[in-house]
Amino acid sequence: MANVAMLGTGLIGLFYTMSLHGKRSRDKVVVVQGRDPEKTKAFADKWGIPRSTTSLEEAVSAPAVDLVVIGLPNHLHLEAVQAAAAAGKGILCTKPLARTAAEAKEILDAVEKAGVFHGYLEDLVYTPKTMKALESVRKGAIGRVLWARSREAHPGPHSDWFWTKELSGGGAIVDLGCHTIEIGRSFVGKDVRPVEVVCWGATQVHPIEAEDSAIGIVRYASGAVAQFEVAWTFRGGMDLRDEVSGTDGTIWINHWLRTGFEMFSAPGSGGYVAEKAETESGWLFPVGDEVSALGYDAMFADMLDAFEQKRAPIETFYDGYVVNAIMDACYRSMETKRWEGVVLDDWRGATEAQSAGVHVEFDARHWLIKLERMPDGRKKLILKDKQTGAVSQRVE
Amino acid sequence: MANVAMLGTGLIGLFYTMSLHGKRSRDKVVVVQGRDPEKTKAFADKWGIPRSTTSLEEAVSAPAVDLVVIGLPNHLHLEAVQAAAAAGKGILCTKPLARTAAEAKEILDAVEKAGVFHGYLEDLVYTPKTMKALESVRKGAIGRVLWARSREAHPGPHSDWFWTKELSGGGAIVDLGCHTIEIGRSFVGKDVRPVEVVCWGATQVHPIEAEDSAIGIVRYASGAVAQFEVAWTFRGGMDLRDEVSGTDGTIWINHWLRTGFEMFSAPGSGGYVAEKAETESGWLFPVGDEVSALGYDAMFADMLDAFEQKRAPIETFYDGYVVNAIMDACYRSMETKRWEGVVLDDWRGATEAQSAGVHVEFDARHWLIKLERMPDGRKKLILKDKQTGAVSQRVE
Amino acid sequence: MANVAMLGTGLIGLFYTMSLHGKRSRDKVVVVQGRDPEKTKAFADKWGIPRSTTSLEEAVSAPAVDLVVIGLPNHLHLEAVQAAAAAGKGILCTKPLARTAAEAKEILDAVEKAGVFHGYLEDLVYTPKTMKALESVRKGAIGRVLWARSREAHPGPHSDWFWTKELSGGGAIVDLGCHTIEIGRSFVGKDVRPVEVVCWGATQVHPIEAEDSAIGIVRYASGAVAQFEVAWTFRGGMDLRDEVSGTDGTIWINHWLRTGFEMFSAPGSGGYVAEKAETESGWLFPVGDEVSALGYDAMFADMLDAFEQKRAPIETFYDGYVVNAIMDACYRSMETKRWEGVVLDDWRGATEAQSAGVHVEFDARHWLIKLERMPDGRKKLILKDKQTGAVSQRVE
Amino acid sequence: MANVAMLGTGLIGLFYTMSLHGKRSRDKVVVVQGRDPEKTKAFADKWGIPRSTTSLEEAVSAPAVDLVVIGLPNHLHLEAVQAAAAAGKGILCTKPLARTAAEAKEILDAVEKAGVFHGYLEDLVYTPKTMKALESVRKGAIGRVLWARSREAHPGPHSDWFWTKELSGGGAIVDLGCHTIEIGRSFVGKDVRPVEVVCWGATQVHPIEAEDSAIGIVRYASGAVAQFEVAWTFRGGMDLRDEVSGTDGTIWINHWLRTGFEMFSAPGSGGYVAEKAETESGWLFPVGDEVSALGYDAMFADMLDAFEQKRAPIETFYDGYVVNAIMDACYRSMETKRWEGVVLDDWRGATEAQSAGVHVEFDARHWLIKLERMPDGRKKLILKDKQTGAVSQRVE
């Protein structure tokens, strides 16, 4: 079992505590830290946490604490990590790891120098559907991965600081892109180097400086591309979907608005429907167990098992650093209006590889381009002469 | 934390143990009992259970054991409950509680006389979607419940004994009807008396004596009906759906084949897809976290919390008894080919009530039957004169 | 091309005219008849119909008319058919054919005695999805049909007369049951005799005499059952779904609320969404081409082609008569609370047949009950000894 | 009614003829032209076309012909248009209009100089769902359009010439991008100038020169972006989906694989499932009426009505030219790896406009950034000070 110091009492601290204290857990939050003493005390009381404080220092250095969970605004991650590392505690940090790759590298260096356990709380890689899909991909169910799409869009974040670029480090890319980039990267393979990026972003709706909408394409060394789409302008709830295509198959995942639970309520349900739901009557799409569907349960199980077993969790600060490097390239591409290389001074994956050919031989002389059944029942073959390159067709 | 004796090592014992030993749980199975010593030992080794035995007596009376979980074939429930009750242990019993209401009453009497904790392991009432839907219904999101449909259909059960009527007590009704009846009853309200039943059942496909397909309609004292459909003949995987209609809304739940996770795999995933999946290539519909989606996690959380807090869990042996009484009436109806009353010598819910009227007044003289928008944009009102009963329409 | 007299200017006359005058059609309505002269004239003007009248006699006997389409309330069908038959015109009549089987038989006798063409306008059998599904079933895609479910539910009909039992002949069964019964019958096979029926019906919500909700089970001579569910109490739009199970497959059809078109609109679309839609903002589920999706286009194409080719259409007055006979049995069952035989004095299909056995042989000694893959990858066989009947299992 | 000369007997000519000769149509193909005399004769016989020929000249100049429909490979469009224009016939040409914008301009000039009727056969803009969605967007149902996604992906085209770059003009962009670009443009508004494009494309799987996969982002003068995704590498059938987001709503359309028709078939349906379906057993997703679902019926209705009414149809050769200009920019972007301007020498829409601001005022001093309901039921407001730009939050 682990004794946890929770830094932060916002929505993310709430979800983390709900998951940690969830179903028959043997782990406990033993101290919670927040800016506002009253709010922090109320949070502690609600969740049965014995101690509350406004002091970061006090929280991370409490002797009863094994593990520090950082659920703070982005601009406070570095300071919190440094304090916790200095106290020799294991550290779990929320997403994004930092505002820039440079800052992420500082954070990574801090934990590696201190030799403390670290986990990157990228929950959406841990959703039940994503975990099972990643396992299928690894087993070859869809062949070689060619393309991935990860989309997260909703009407905008919960906290004021996230709308202020200096504190958050950016807009929808920093808030949502970090998730969607890491999901795409997980499907392509975390060992495969992200090579370059092209990105569009704009402030389409909100009276803010940062982008409230963006689309990016990340090209990997394997030839695969992972496209991400993020928006703080979406209407209808939270759109959280992933798609993956491979040479032999396809995966479609919908985490939120269409999960097999549909409700029409004329009077309205009189309460909370689901995170980022916009409406309370008419057709609603609740999620059964949100904390589980968002990956928190499986994430903390992996993190705490890893902590006890002294192994690395699936998501580490190094992953957070790679994600920040990709986001940096996105912001550069938005300015230069061209593809930008992903700068990774510290690359720990495979060295660059060419995409493998997968042509199918029809006979000694031809490649098979395509085999298809026509509406009238006949089969049609499209062939390519290996020598001449001429394309021909046969109907059988 | 609870120390559990697991009786049975079949599929149900496997799912129970997976859930109990799941994510960061503080509960442990400390002894497992099975018929086959080698298989039982292998089960214990796989799940880190310190002790295995073929003796029911030994398992239920082990001093380290707080709680006995019965995952045995139906014909062994009574004996196992009696042994565990004699040992003074808390008891959780799998579904159905018994083969008949009479047997269920014996089981209920045994635990109540012994004064031991008891929980009925009706997992499908505890799925994340069902739990949230039940809460919405209680809050009035769909008004007064009028109708429910619960359907469970798949290609047939896993174990030989379930195909033998003497051991199981029946066919698809006893196997699947117990779930679907209790789901319907939960939506209508467990306090509302089930009055009568009409049921069709037949052996349509399999070379067995018991019914492999059945449809039943349960009428409740509130005027609501709950229809159930069960089959061991379904093709395409496991069909697990619930629907509820009320005066003010509708709920549709799909637990299994359409949950927002879709995969096309040409080569096949090379392994296990989901419980009762029939195919391993082409379009597949995996479930992210099966143990959670089937309700095991929330069920054991409620059961073990209840055990510790010395309160009744959501599902008790009394509920199991009511379900058996409804199933008995179904079998009678199949023979007599008419509606049959549900015989409940021991009814603990509300005394019979008439269904409440909910007419909407349009003006002093008329009831409103309906208000509708036509394709050309006009609104049409259908009214009924309170005195004369004459129906008229107005277009606005 | 056909020249049509349209009797009736309500919603059904509107849909029929929209379909007949639809995309590049060569058929035309040349006279329209309605009760209200002004409304009928306006209808004629809107749809470019040269002549309008309030006289049934005048409409059906106009020399320019080839074909009379009856879109009148149920209690007027017999009179209209008799008039059109006397005029020697081809006749298409809306659903239900009549209020009772006896009345339907009179209608059938009238057209057969006059020797005129007749078609039963059961549009939902002609939807694009149902037509393709029926073809797949005929080709053996799902094996022997075991079970069908057809459901139609919405907040209630458009016209005052439909809420008055004397005029309509009943409630939701007569209005919606006629569709759902004929859909089920089409999947089972129209040559297969419907044997008996059990039916529940009640007035759950509306201040009316007739049933606003009903569930029926029709048992066929082949052993198949077709269940139907109808309601005028449904909330959320129009629920129009069919399901069919066979020994080798399954079909699920959703005609209305989930067809691949989903819209979230905060302000509302400012107009008509779809037939029986209840809401105009929030999540909406429009249907692309309603007239096509409801089967009107394919129905009139078949009817008019049949009329020109002097063959019977897919749905004739005989089919309407069979449907009325099944509905009669439903009403009897609601009173007697038991299964009631379907009385068909004039049965033109196959004589009764026993359901065929379809046991699968495993080896000379055993039937195969089931083959299944377990979560751990093993295969399990459930076998039955042909001699002793003993059930056993093998794991491979 | 129109008398049509059909040029081409491939899949597209087949679909066109099926639609033209479909349900009760008054239009007829009176001559069909193809390369292979026998195949062309067989086509004519099957569809009841009185005359077949291998001569383009003969087909377009037949006196009985009003309208020439061009269903030929891309490299033959210019020649066919010139011949038909010279003969003074109305012309409908399949998509893409040409291989490049320059060639498209020649085609456009030819018809405009000859003064003949012309329609661009972009069927996917005419699907029932797209038509209804476009109408909703025009009525303001989703507010100002911000983003659109149109995706078409399948295992590759039917005909050999499409796999040969010189004949087709390109790969998946030319084949599928033309559809998806015009769909996006239709949602943004055809009057709005497409400004610039960034595009990724690659040959990921097939042994061909052209791209078999591409993603493009088109930025419009209104600030909206329309993203398109095309692939000849998709596995699982044909993926045909559109999504649109606006300031006040969202639209999701699935045209093909999830339309409310689902079938599990163990033996397989023994025949044709749907265009580009890959499998014939297991879970299948047929489309009820493919010719209608793909837009052919509504497209020809508009085209032939327009021809008779002497008005422009919804899609004209000018639209085809704009699409070619966008595709040209895509190919340039793939080479330069940067955003490329869309070159439109002949722009007939609105002159450039700035995107309109849509900030919501909270009070005299603040803009409202966001209003949200939290899981605990409270409402949170995110505000921005109009003067200082400071972001703050209030919980109510």
Image (tube, coloured by chain):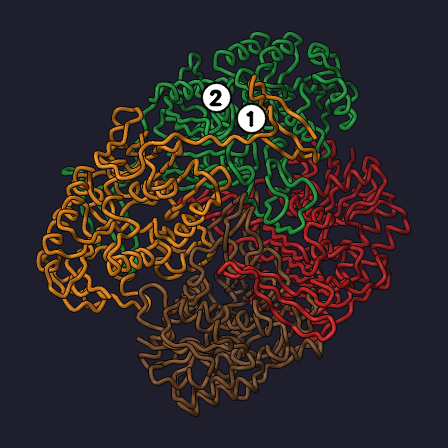
Chain colours: A brown, B orange, C green, D red
Q: Position of residue C304 (x, y in %)?
A: 64, 24
Residue D161 visible in the picture: no
Q: Residue at x 63, y 80 (%)?
A: A166
Residue D96 in view of the camera? yes
What chain is tagged by disc 1? C
Chain containing the residue with disc 2: C
Q: Which residue is mark 1?
A: C122
Q: Position of residue A159 (x, y in %)?
A: 57, 70
Q: Are marks 1 and 2 in contact (CB under 8 Å)?
A: yes
Counting the numbered discs, the total is: 2
**In this orientation, which residue lies closer to the viewer: A295 or C208?**
C208
For residue C161, side relative to residue C335 (left or right): right
Task: Tell me if D160 is positioned left or right of B84 in this view.
Answer: right
* Marks 1 and 2, how far apart at CA: 11 Å
Q: Who comes first in sequence, dot 1 or dot 2? A: 1
Is disc 1 placed on a helix, strand or loop?
loop
Q: Splitting the image into 4 quarters, where does residue C326 fall? A: top left
Residue A81 position (above or below residue B130) = below
Above or below, B28 against D41 in this view is below
